[in-house]
């Protein structure tokens, strides 16, 4: 995403992440979700971001679990739900260490 060694091209980045994400590459799914969340190379779309975060989380990808927990905590692309935020947070010890839910 940083254009290391080449000109930065968010549209091409989205295309490459899309190919890898379609092949169930979990980190590409998280990165593609980020591109949709921030509107980089595509129109901003938190609903699509959550679709890709969820795909990654279903494979146990730490970043996917974290992004889903934060989405449910903040109501980004989903209806805010502290219980679901907690459910996603407890699936991975690294996520549990991050204060995602008030009072946690």
Image (tube, helix red, strand yellow):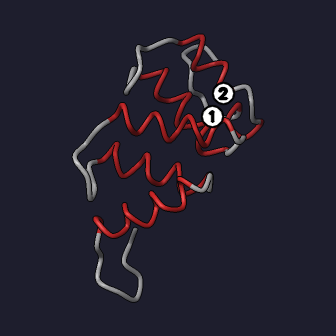
Residue 74's place in the image compared with 8, above or below, is: above
| Mark 2 neighbour class, 10 Å CA radius: few under 14, some 14 to 19, many 20 or more | many
Please tell me whether mark 1 sits on a helix, a strand or a loop.
Answer: loop
Residue 90's place in the image compared with 103, above or below, is: below
**In terms of image quadrants, where is residue 50?**
top left
**In terms of image quadrants, where is residue 87?**
top right
* Marks 1 and 2 in Cβ contact (< 8 Å): yes
| Mark 1 neighbour class, 10 Å CA radius: few under 14, some 14 to 19, many 20 or more | few
Residue at 37%, 61% (x, y): give it: 14
Q: Which mark is residue 61?
A: none
Relative depth, front residue between 17 and 35: 17
Residue tagged 2:
89
Residue at 49%, 41% (x, y): give it: 52
Mark 1 / mark 2, whichever is N-terminal = 2
- As drawn, is 4 to the left or to the right of 87? left
Residue at 61%, 43% (x, y): give it: 56
Residue tagged 1:
98
Relative depth, front residue between 43 and 22: 22
In the rendered image, residue 24, in percent from the top left (x then y), is placed at 62, 52
| Quarter the C terminus occupies | top right
**In terms of image quadrants, where is residue 58?**
top right
Real-space Cα separation, disc 1 to disc 2, in angstroms: 8 Å
- As drawn, is 51 to the left or to the right of 41? right
Residue at 46%, 28% (x, y): give it: 71
Relative depth, front residue between 15 and 91: 15
Residue 33's place in the image compared with 2, above or below, is: above
């Amino acid at each position: 995403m940083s254009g290391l060694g080449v000109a930065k091209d968010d549209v091409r980045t989205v295309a490459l992440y899309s190919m890898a994400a379609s092949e169930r590459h979990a980190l590409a799914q998280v990165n593609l979700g980020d591109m949709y969340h921030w509107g980089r190379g595509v129109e901003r779309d938190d609903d699509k971001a959550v679709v890709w975060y969820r795909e990654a989380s279903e494979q146990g990808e730490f970043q996917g679990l974290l992004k889903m927990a934060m989405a449910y905590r903040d109501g980004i692309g989903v209806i805010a739900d502290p219980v679901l935020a907690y459910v996603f947070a407890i699936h991975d010890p690294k996520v549990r260490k991050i204060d995602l839910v008030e009072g946690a």
